[in-house]
Image: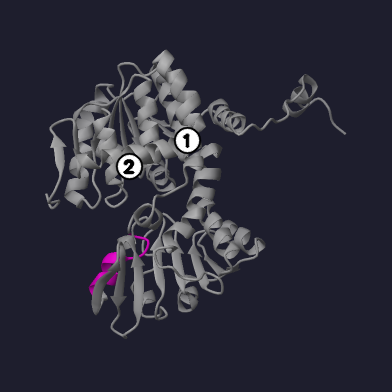
Amino acid sequence: MNVIYMDAKEGMYKVADIKLAEKGRESIYVAARKMPVTCKVLRERFAKEKPLKGIKVAGCLHITKETANLALTLKEGGAEVLLCGSNPLSTQDDTAAALAEQGIKVFAWHGNTSEEFYWCIKECLKQKPNILIDDGADLIVTAHKEFPELIKSGTIMGCQEETTTGVKRFKAMDEAKQLKVPLFPVNDARCKNEFDNELGTGQGVLSAIQGMHILMAGKVVVVAGFGHCGSGMALRARGLGAQVLVTEVDPIQALKAVFAGYRVVPMDEACKEADVIFTVTGCKDVVTTKHFDMLKDGCILGNLGHFDVEVATKKLYEIAKDRKPIRKDVEEITLKNGRKVYLLGQGRLANLVLTEGHPSEVMDMSFGLQSLISEFIVKNYKTFKPGMIDVPKDIDDKVGLLKLDAMGIKIDKLSEVQYKYIHGYEEGT
């Protein structure tokens, strides 16, 4: 273990410093006030009904104040909750300490190594969880590789994945007939990807760049990837006055970017103009060796995709003439041509590493979904087969309605005649 200071209670938690709990409780409270679906409506019902009584839920998630509120809601529902971080740099140590203090079995600290990262995952799996909630697929993939008995014995009732990257991995596993558990791609639910991804990651542009304190107006900002996350990022960068260029490999997404008013160009061209490059593709080597020598002096590189491979960080380090930290989680990389570029968060999720991640308001819907899917799994797991299972539309809609209600917003309802019209075929021209 490379972490010098750490508090641990064997089998219960391992965090950086349990004395940070008071600060963590404050952050969790502030987030809860902005998460009425997860922290009020569902938590109050779960506390009364205990739908997860006797169930162990393990989550490989970013340990933030928002995730803490998901964990506490599941606990109120009767679950024993185990948590490990889904990214070595995204754990908020004060939040982890507060959760450990409140009985959540959390194994996470900011800045763990790859070896420590997987140690934390295995600590959760050793305790034989029934429901797995993943952020990037590492927990569930590790269960397949190293804890197959949990799958063969039926201990695992069902799983959830909340990221685009993770869903892609599981779709590939499913197509290869290697996905051995029932899995709900929560990321694909509308209440998740149209808000958490688009608004949360979109606003993450502001969070990620604030550590550099630059004026965005007039800058050339390149957004690699124009899915839900990238489109939100591009919109907000443009809103700050930046000239936004988009790079894509998908012709339809590229067309959407063109018709939204952005200039679409290959990365080989875009990188030469860029003052800032943000990657959010779910793929590797988006900005790689051939691009580094083309970057302008002072270019900022930030990744908001799940893994640290979109900007080829290891390759950048290898060719660097010099590398030094200039502030927390920002490195100045001097290239062999003398130009300097600035790498955010070691190429990891910049909005989570440099600041606090997505706003609580949008995470409320994502974690409301995960709470209700956990309940749905417990009630229906005997009917599931291994493979991908869509989030039921009624659960997706329910979260949306609960959010609207919490905001004091009413919407129309279909009349019986209207319902029959849009669900029928009898009426024509």
Is 317 one of the magenta-colored residues? Answer: yes
What residue is shown at x 74% (from left), y 24% (from top)? 419
- Depth order, front residue of 38/274: 38
Is 110 one of the magenta-colored residues? Answer: no
Q: Position of residue 372 (x, y in %)?
A: 46, 26
Q: Is residue 119 left or right of residue 260?
A: left
Quarter of the figure with residue 72: top left
Quarter of the figure with residue 120: top left
The answer for how far apart the CA atoms under marks 1 and 2 are is: 18 Å
The type of colouring in the image is one colour
Residue 68 visible, this angle: yes
What residue is shown at x 50% (from left), y 24% (from top)? 41
Q: Position of residue 401 (x, y in %)?
A: 60, 29
Q: Name the residue that disc number 1 marks.
A: 33
Q: Which residues are magenta?
A: 309-318
Q: Which mark is residue 169?
A: none
What residue is shown at x 32% (from left), y 49% (from top)? 90
**How many marks on residues?**
2
- Depth order, front residue of 20/293: 20
- Depth order, front residue of 147/56: 56
Residue 141 visible, this angle: no
Q: Position of residue 53 (x, y in %)?
A: 34, 16
Instruction: Tell me the SS state at disc 2.
Output: loop
Q: Which mark is residue 63?
A: 2
Q: Residues within 10 Å of mark 2 (few under 14, many from 20)?
A: many
Q: Residues within 10 Å of mark 1 (few under 14, many from 20)?
A: few
Q: Callout 2, which amino acid?
A: Ile
Q: Is residue 351 left or right of residue 189?
A: left
